[in-house]
Amino acid sequence: MKITKVETFVLSNKLKESFFFSQWEYNERRICIVKITTDDGQCGWGEGYGPADVIKSGINLVTPLLIGENPLENERLWFNMYRKTLDFARRGILVASISAIDVALWDLKGKILNQPISVLMGGQHRTKVIPYATGLYFSESDNLVAKLVAEAQTYVEQGFKAIKMKVGLSVSKDIILVKSVREAIGNEVKLMIDANHAYSLREATKLSRALEQYNIDWFEEPVSPEYYHHYNQLRSKTTIPIAGGECEYLRYGFQTLLDNDSIDILQVDICGAGGLSEAKRISTLANTRGVEIIPHVWGTGIAFHAALHFIANLEPIPGRLQPSNKYIEYDRTENEIRESLTAPSIKMKNGYIDIPQLPGLGIQIDEKMVRHFSSEILI
């Protein structure tokens, strides 16, 4: 069995209503996915996290390393792609290109061997996870507080046990928003905040101390990912757990993050940091430090299901009779591509989402929707 074709598709969809966070405004979803096909007609799908057009170019760069190769040798193929790009892409977008291919190879491998990815990674330590609703972004609103409160209450009504909201407008405004949302959802629902590295250490410290009374489960990307020592210092100044890592790449970047004792919660993005193969290695590093992993997830159902399999395989650390729950990020902002590209649809039941048990990622790609959202031609 050999790989005969690698196809990339840039999917795009204009949003009905734009939204923004501390850094940028979103008015469009634009995502690069990849399809890898073998000589017997089987195929696997993957996705890259980051600028879609650049990821597409990166995939095209390493495609010659894949054609004619055995898809079951996915770790060897990963290393060949890594070595090909090492001199000029130790971090960043080409790693996301490798990530997309790696996820597609795992999907293909699962289909060939008729096993879920999580089983092939070593087994499922759990069969369900708790999704937390990511939303509560900023928008041009006459009453942002009321809008965010209503959105948060909707998530509670839908059965979510945890919610993550954006901060980063200013310390004073953030305090008002977080206080209002906490009062609206009550104390039984977990609440997390994400600044997308908007703050200096001084500002992040001030905000953290002001928000400790609202039972915040973690403060995500409080400061720039470049300042590992600031993460470390902030951890000593607040009781709120500190999370980060979505801007980190490969095991080597995460080694630096861990060596600096920067975080309580590690947020590897599987479709950006090196794929499932590298995420597995990163989880071993985190395991040696006793650092919890809750992956960053953004994009389509491909990325979401890759994260489900990864979380299913994470070892329960520390081990005990009643292990703690594992969480997965579930973006609830407008995303027609996510909602229509993959089947079966993502379903939450009693606050949980089941781990897929079908081969590969456990999903089917609607190629009519690929054509619909893409300017590429599917043959």
Image: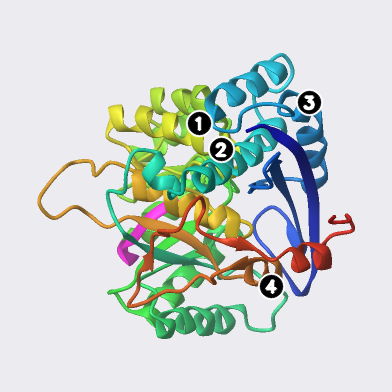
Q: Position of residue 122 (x, y in %)?
A: 34, 38
Camera-nearest residue between 310 and 162: 310
Q: Which residues are magenta?
A: 213-219
Q: Bin the neighbour count of mark 4 within 10 Å (Cα to Cα): few under 14, some 14-19, many 20 and up.
A: some
Q: Is residue 66 above or below residue 19?
A: above
Looking at the picture, tell me which residue is in the foreground, 211 or 282.
Answer: 282
Q: Say whether disc 3 or disc 4 marks the residue closer to the N-terminus.
A: 3
* Residues at discs 2 and 1 in contact (Cβ within 8 Å): yes
The residue to which callout 4 is attached is 139
Q: Amino acid at mark 3?
A: Pro
| Rendering quarter of residue 266 | top left
- Asked if residue 241 shows in the view, the reply is no
Q: Rounded to the nearest whole Å, what is the CA distance between mark 1 and mark 3?
A: 21 Å
Residue 336 included in the magenta stretch of the image: no
Front residue of this view, candidates 312 and 223:
312
Q: Earlier in the sequence, mark 2 or mark 4?
A: 4
Rendered image: mark on residue 275: 2
User: Secondary structure beneath disc 2?
Assistant: helix
Residue 45 position within the rendered picture, expressed as x and y whole percent measured from the top left: 64, 49
- How far is the residue under mark 2 from the one under mark 4? 32 Å
Position of 189 relative to 259 (above/below): below
SS assignment at label 3: helix
Q: Indicate which disc, 1 or 3, sits on the residue closer to the N terminus.
A: 3
Query: Which residue in the structure is indicated by mark 3?
Result: 64
